[in-house]
Amino acid sequence: MTLKDISQGPAEAILWIIFSLLFVISIIFLSGDGSTLIAGYNTASKKEKERIDQKKLCRIVGAGLLPIAVLVLIMAIFLDTLPFFFVYIFVFFTLLDAVLVVILANTRTKNL
């Protein structure tokens, strides 16, 4: 059974849209911009923002989004041939990536 067998509706188009959005947002973050899109940072006080290196934070979040975008791209391209358990692999790596991004964002971005 493949991913296409278990999907309902226009899965391929949705995957391409999600990949495009994730890729564009990742590029924005990797360039060091887009800090207003990071939850928690844009609502932090001025004093808290001064203790965080904004460029490093954006680059860490961008580097974290890029592997997820690549996994979505793989699913979009190989929708007809990937086995259905690839969804579990995708979820595992996405959760692992999210944990790593949170750890790195909280340890590597502090200005002392």
Image (cartoon, helix red, strand yellow):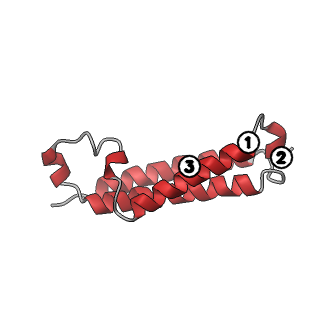
Q: Secondary structure at mark 3?
A: helix
Q: Nearer the viewer, residue 29 or 100?
A: 29
Q: Secondary structure at mark 2?
A: loop
Mark 1 Cα within 10 Å, few/some/many (few <14, many 20+)? some
Residue 105, position as x, y percentages in the image: 34, 54
> Disc 2 marks which residue?
2
Side (left or right) of 22 relative to 17: left
Residue drawn 42% across the image and 53% down it: 101
Side (left or right) of 74 relative to 81: left
Q: Nearer the viewer, residue 44 or 15?
A: 15
Which mark's residue is nearer the viewer, 2 or 1? 1
Residue drawn 77% across the image and 56% down it: 78
Mark 2 Cα within 10 Å, few/some/many (few <14, many 20+)? some
> Disc 3 marks which residue?
94
Q: Amino acid at mark 3?
A: Thr
Is residue 108 something one can see in this rendering? no
Q: Are marks 3 and 2 in contact (CB under 8 Å)?
A: no
Residue drawn 27% across the image and 58% down it: 54
Residue 14, position as x, y percentages in the image: 67, 43
Rounded to the nearest angstrom, the CA distance separating label 3 from label 2 is 20 Å
